[in-house]
Image: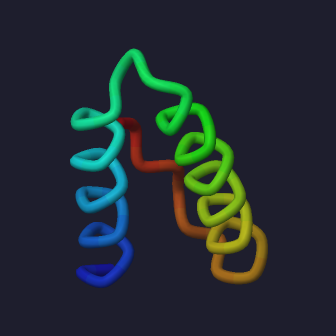
Amino acid sequence: DGLILGIHKQIKGILDLCEGDLVSYEWLKVHTFIRQQFQRPLKIPTIAL
């Protein structure tokens, strides 16, 4: 759980830095993909950003 939360915090930090940039859209896609990968096999509830 700590690892997952750490990844979410890391990605949120990057999104905050890139807000309003095209890069943020790329990171959003990456974040969504990562979240889906974790949700499906491990049944981890969505961590709202």
Above or below, 22 against 32 in this view is above
Percent x, y of residue 19? 34, 24
Quick check: 4 left or right of 46? left
Above or below, 26 against 35 in this view is above
Quick check: 30 left or right of 37? left
Q: Residue at x 38, y 74 (%)?
A: 4
- Quadrant in the rendering for residue 2: bottom left
Q: How is the image coloured?
A: rainbow
In the image, farthest residue toward the top: 20
Camera-nearest residue between 2 and 12? 12
Q: Residue at x 35, y 39 (%)?
A: 15
Camera-nearest residue between 40 and 9? 9
Camera-nearest residue between 25 and 11? 25
Percent x, y of residue 27? 53, 47
Percent x, y of residue 32? 65, 49
Q: Residue at x 52, y 49 (%)?
A: 46
Above or below, 45 against 3 in this view is above
Percent x, y of residue 34? 62, 66
In the image, farthest residue toward the right: 40
How many numbered marks are there?
0
Above or below, 22 against 17 in this view is above
The N terminus lies in which quarter of the figure? Answer: bottom left
The C terminus lies in which quarter of the figure? Answer: top left
